[in-house]
Amino acid sequence: MEGKVFLGQNLIWVMLLMGQLHGYKSCIEKERNALFELRKYIVSIAEEDQSDSVLPTWTNDTTRDCCRWKGVECNRISGLVTELAFGGLSLKDNSLLNLSLLHPFEDVRSLNLSSSGFSGFFDDVEGYKSLRRLRKLEILDLSSNKFNNSIFHFLSAATSLTTLFLRSNNMVGSFPAKELRDLTNLELLDLSRNRFNSSIPIQGICELKNMQDLDLSQNQLVGHFPSCLTSLIGLRVLDLSSNQLNGTVPSTLGSLQSLEYLSLFDNDFEGSFSFGSLANLSNLMVLKLCSKSSSLQVLSESSWKPKFQLSVIALRSCNMEKVPHFLLHQKDLRHVDLSNNKISGKLPSWLLANNTKLKILLLQNNFFTSFQIPKSAHDLLFLDVSANEFNHLFPENIGWIFPHLRYMNISKNDFQGNLPSSLGNMKGLRYLDLSHNSFHGKLPRSFVKGCYSMAILKLSHNKLSGEIFPESTNLTSILGLFMDNNLFTGKIGQGLRSLINLELLDMSNNNLTDVIPSWIGELPSLTALLISDNFLKGEIPTSLFNKSSLQLLDLSTNSLSGGIPPHHSSRNGVVLLLQDNNLSGTIADTLLANVEILDLRNNRFSGNIPEFINTQNISILLLRGNSLTGRIPHQLCGLSNIQLLDLSNNRLNGSIPSCLSNTSFGFGKECTSYDYDFGISFPSDVFNGFSLHQDFSSNKNSGIYFKSLLMLDPFSMDYKAATQTKIEFATKYRYDAYMGGNLKLLYGIDLSENELSGEIPVEFGGLLELRALNLSHNNLSGGIPKSFSSMEKMESFDLSFNRLQGRIPSQLTELTSLSVFKVSHNNLSGVIPEGRQFNTFDAESYLGNRLLCGQPTNRSCNNNSFEEADDEVEDNESTIDMESFYWSFGAAYVTILVGILASLSFDSPWKRFWFDTVDAFIHKLHGYKSCIQKERNALLKLKKYIISISEEGDFNFFFNTWTNDTKSDCCRWEGVECNRTSRRVIKLSTGKSSVVEDSQLNLSLLHPFEEVRSLDLSGDGVYGFSALFDDVEGYKSLRKLKNLEILDLSSNGFNNTIFPFLNAATSIKTLILRDNIVHGSFPLKGAFVDLLQPTMHLRTYKLNKLGTARSKWKQFKQLHISRRVGLVYVIMSILRDLLVCHVAESHHLKELKALDLSICKLKNLQELDISDSQLSGQFPLCITTLSGLRVLDLSSNQLTGRLPSSIGNLKSLEYLSLVDNNFEGVFSFGLLANLSKLKVVTLCSKSNSLQVDMNTSSTPKFQLSVISLRYCNLEEVPRFLLHQKELRQVDLSNNIISGLFPSWLLEYNAKLEVLLLQNNSLTSFRLPKAAHNLSLLDVSVNKFNQIFPQNIGWMLPNLQHMNLSENSFQGNLPSSLGNMENMYFLDISHNSFHGKLPRSFEMGCYSMRFLKLSHNQLSGEIFSRSPNFTQLFALFIDNNQFTGKIGDGLKSLRSLNILDMSGNYLTGVIPSWIGEDLSLHMLFISNNLLEGEIPVSVFNMSFLGPLDLSANKLSGAIPPRLNSMFNVVLNLQDNNLTGPIPDTLLENVVVLDLRNNKFSGHIPGFINTQNISILLLKGNMLTGPIPRKVCEFSSISLRDLSNNRLNGSIPSCLSKTSYGKGKYFEPYEYDSSVSYDDFGLEMEGFTPTNSRRYYKSLLVLDHFSVQYTSAIQTKIKFAAKQRYDTYMGGSLRYMFGLDLSENELSGVIPEEVGDLLELHALNLSHNHLSGAIPESFSRTENMESLDLSFNSFQGRIPSKLTEMSSLAVFNVSYNNLSGVIPQGRQFNTFDESSYIGNPLLCGKPTNRSCSSSNVLEEPEDGVEDDDVAVFMVSFRRSFVVGYVTIVLGILASLSLYSPWSRAWFSVVDAFIHKMKKLSS
């Protein structure tokens, strides 16, 4: 039989051979003619210029076999056509295929018409039944055409079809189920990439029982998953991805036993889906699932084991919180996508270890925190872990583990450390994105030399430093290079010249210096160049303007100078951004020829705006902030594609051309929105091997290409790089940056801040698409055009500060999009329109138009107002209004003058004051000295006496004005006040003198001041006067001062001996004795009782007896006993008539209930103060029965519960303070509405659980002076404040108030002095209409996001304290700030202010003490000229963009204590005068570009605390010692300092940071080390052993000596250092702070005329003060837990660590190190340490991080280490450890990476089992050294055996006769001869 088969095969070959020999034509003539006719037809419908390219091999040449024509395949025996393909045609629109032309091909089985361009079929004979003629047709490919649903009628006749491709056509509407149901033989159906938008019908598709492959992806199918699909048991491929299916995913999918490919991607499925339902699908290879709505929850139970082995799994957006457990069983994965989930924890490196074929791993947009890579190298190609939460050092060996990576994206994490040098091993890497991390240091040389395949490199937003490519690199294939937002310095490197393929280069926002090299414009492929925000200088190279391929050039925000080239040669149109430089000269008229965006803002261009030519391309033209003059040229009217035009802030004059209305601004058909974003995209097929294809090219898989097409879909990734064009434009009071879609839709004109005149052209109303128009700050006149009402899309309209007249057109209310409308400071008149948007504008929009009336102004439109007439001309109305104004002004002037003269005819105090003033003025003109000589001499004598008893060196500067100069008036001396008429002293103060202990005051020195009424002898609270004396008058001395009413002896050292003197002062009404040492019996004898009749205020520290005169107490009306409570119960049982009870600051009142009965019996009580006394419980209701109560202060206690409504019964209440308690619930302010005497209300809750209800319909009867409602959960400003007119202090801070700044509070309350609105959500800052006398304003921590008002200094000229910090205020600092001459405190930090400091500000604010400008974008030089801030105490200008040298103007700030200039771009050297002329306590100049050596004078500053010069370019040696009398925090890290470290450097230092410099030599044997707490010497070139002197550091907490070249052993005496250990260890407070009281606001009342009232209602008239506190936190970086973290505050004080890693230390670890019990982190990695790991480490219970990796440790890991309960990181990798890894407690949490590189370790978490054959059991009492010995014996034996074996092998091989043995003996023989020759 086999012979017959063999014979038959040979006969067939013979026949075929004979046929060829005889010229047999296999193509039959009939089909040849049919093919030629088909070609002829196609040529007829092809596009005219494509006819020659249509099927060119199909010719009429009879000698050619048609079976060999392209696209034709025949049966080898019959010669009939079996496969026919003629795709890829270019046909005319709506071309149809004549199916009758296919009928001759009766044997055709496969017909491929893909990508032909056909729109449909026709057959004039057969009609819809045409395809039934092709009875053997099985495969029909109609994909990528223009077919619509009409072809289904034809397809229904092709019943023989098994495979049908219809993807990528124009099919829409309902799914064609009916038309397909006759195709019962169909096995593969592809309808993907169409637009079917119905549900999948159950009938039809589910009847195709032979279906194996079904692809309905990328349509718009809706409805639920059709459950009938699960009945197609032969289904192998099911793809329903990218539709709009909803509902749940059916669990019956598990019944599809043949399923190989399942994709349900990008639908709207919801509910939960369990992978367990797929467990039995043994053929499943591809699984894709996600939900667009993110409402699908995928469940992955761990109780089942799948039968399948997947190749691809994609589970995006599945709300998974962990990696599916079943993946542990997968071994053949090639593509894993788990992106966009919520997975946290460690990176699943086991996926790589288990799947050696894995090529793609996508894990982006999750919450992974630990990046761990496999132990051995892997062939992974694509890795994306971007947008996770990694926060540690990036693995150093990444390049060795993943050498074949082509794509790696780790952006948007917080990876730290240097870039690994192993990256250079990734030779095939083409895309690398490291942006938005915290990498620092220089680019590794191996990286720039090794990654020669790189196409896109993104390094943006890191902290990388060094020069940019100073030498040539191998990155010659690179197309996109992003290095922006780093810390690169120096020149632009020559190495960039080798990047010949570079298209996009972004180096913006670095610290680059010098000029732009001309060769950069010669890079052949460059299309985008961004170098903004650097320090480049010089001129713009002409080569950049000659670059024809360039499309984007951004050189903004540098220091470029000179002119700009006249035109750009770009062939595609260029975006040219040159703003914020020093460019000068004129602008060329040819500049716009090839430019689409031109930004020249904020330069120094001069001359006229040129008459531009070729303006058709320009879309955005920005010329703001130059010195342009002349008129606006008419050529600008030809800007046919203009979108934004900004000519503001120049000196343009003349009228506005009316033809500007002819420009486009988005209007008209020709105007198309330009795509301003620039990008380059590199698809996968640009580079060889960029795509990842499944293996379907083999014979094995080729037959199932169509049957399982989608199982074998290729993976490719387009690599994109883009940069967005940002344009700044002022609109809606803000100067915002627009980009992307927002920029495309913004149309605006800004002509503000020029000198334009004339009228506004009426034609402007035709700019219908305009959204912003700013014509403010010009000289425009005339009326507002009514045509503006046509601009329906207008959002921002600013016409302020002009001379516009007439009415505001009522038609403007039709502008429905208008959100900002400003016409302030014009001459407008008439009624303000109302309705729609105009109802939202406040009075600020109309300021400065006195003839406007109506809402929202307060001017009513009465009968004298002129009604607007329809046909009247507005000019006439304006004239009438001005005439009325003149008449009213004259009448008012006469009335006021007559009123003044009439009032002066009455006898009144203010009349006497007026005449006294006039009299004083007249006397001054005549040179009269108003101070009488007797009292002048007495004052000088008093001064001399007080100085004689003052502390040495503590001279009271208060007396500086008390001079012997006869020209000075003693009535103007400080502390002296005289009667204006008599010129006698009536008020005298000695200014809180600091005298020596036990000093006495001679009262006789006061006798000359016979008319004195107020005498202030208060002390400073330290010593002060201790007694009084008078050698002549004795105890009766004070009776000589007959007019004395107020005597203040507080804060001295007086005891009871003063009372006999005080008995004589019978005229006293107010006596203040608080803060003295009066003690013993209460002074109730003699006349002193009469003296105390009106008022007494005692604030004593020792008051322990009542004395015997109990009856005398009943005469008291007031009781003030501060800080003492032992007497309260006794006293109140006696004083039933008590009017005032003040027991504040009595911290022993634990519960108020104990006082209930006593207090409530005091029916005459008027003032009750029990504040700050730790009271608890609820508010006592009985207090509300004290109907005469005027003052109630329960503040600063711990009261809880609700506030009673009966508080409203206290009709006499003037002062109510309930702040700082724990009240809760709702309190209605309406309850207080009838308290007509109420003046002060303060209320808040510490627990923030009190809700204050402000909704009250009644008008309050009170007029408050003070209201404080902090932490009251207010959402708006209380409405009842609209009725308050006498407010002086308003505190609404720490609420949730939003909306507009309540400027009406200032307008309604002329006396308002304090306004506190910090910590709210206010969004719009508005000033009052007129100037106000406000003293303190705090609006910090709100949501203001606008240009700060320019007139702030004119509106609030008397401000002393202003805090605007932590908002988003924009624009330049207003020059009007210079008008605030009394400003003490100004904080504008954390905003977006830019530009230079106004000179008027520097010279005008001469009272400034505290100035904080931090965290803005301010620029220019720092005080190049002397400012007038002579009293400045603290100056913070850090984190801005200041440039240049440190200005000499700082030398004038002699009072400066704190100076912070860090985080700027300062250059030059640190001037020596900064340490000579300034008495600084704190100096911070870190993170700048300073060079040179550290001046010795800086180290000689006597009062220096912290000194931070880090992160500069300082060089040279450092001075040997700091001579400060304080402990110094010295930060000098990250510089280029060299030389040895002086041994005296630690003398006054508590923190020394010298990391990352170039210090060399040994670590010195420091002297005076008792203060040092933190010593950081990492990253230098220190050598030698660790000196034993470091063991004497008694206060050390952190020590970092890593990354040096230290050698020798670790000193065992290190255990004697503190590290928090010891009974007397106190953590050092590293943070530096300073605080001072400089702002005091005395409330009305403390004057001689109302001093009696001061103590009767003491708390109504509180003294208000603000304490200025400034704190600077010391931040220390230290490596622990595999991260390089920053520690500060409390975390720094209690962080104890030792880092000796990356040195050359050897020997064993001393056992004594285990005695460092408080140590939290120990790093000894990367050394040469050996021996065993000490068991003593187990005693370090606080240890959190222990790293011993990369050493030579041997033996076992001590099991006792499991007692370290705080251990979070343990790393012993790459040692020689052996034995069983301990288990238990923290050791159960460590993974395999902790033990890598120790092959003899076994047990969990490694995969090595500890069998008895190869592992010794650990004896319970054994010593680990024995184990080490055993292993070493085995090692020695195996070494000897191996050595002997190798030697015997060599000898045996030499015994064989071979060429290499002959060569060996020849070499040996030659060597022997040579040695003999040498020896002879």
Image (cartoon, rainbow, N blue to C red):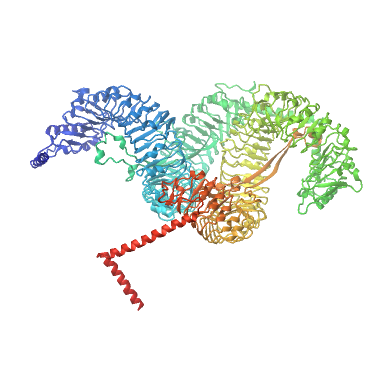
Residue 1807 horizontal side relative to residue 1685, left or right: left
* Residue placed most toward the observer, 1174 or 948: 1174
Q: Determine the image quadrant of residue 665.
A: top left
Q: Determine the image quadrant of residue 1362.
A: top right
Residue 1610, how many percent across, how many down? 54, 58
The vertical placement of 179 against 468, above or below, is above
Q: Determine the image quadrant of residue 755.
A: top right
The reply to whether residue 1680 is visible in this rendering is no
* Residue placed most toward the observer, 409 or 143: 409
Residue 420, how many percent across, how many down? 44, 51
- Which quadrant, please, contains the C terminus? bottom left
The reply to whether residue 90 is visible in this rendering is yes
Residue 1851, how many percent across, how many down? 30, 65
Residue 940 horizontal side relative to residue 55, left or right: right
Residue 961, how many percent across, how many down? 77, 48
* Residue placed most toward the observer, 689 or 1008: 689
The vertical placement of 556 against 1838, above or below, is above
- Which quadrant, please, contains the N terminus? top left
Total marks placed: 0
Residue drawn at the location 21% of the way across and 26% of the way down: 131
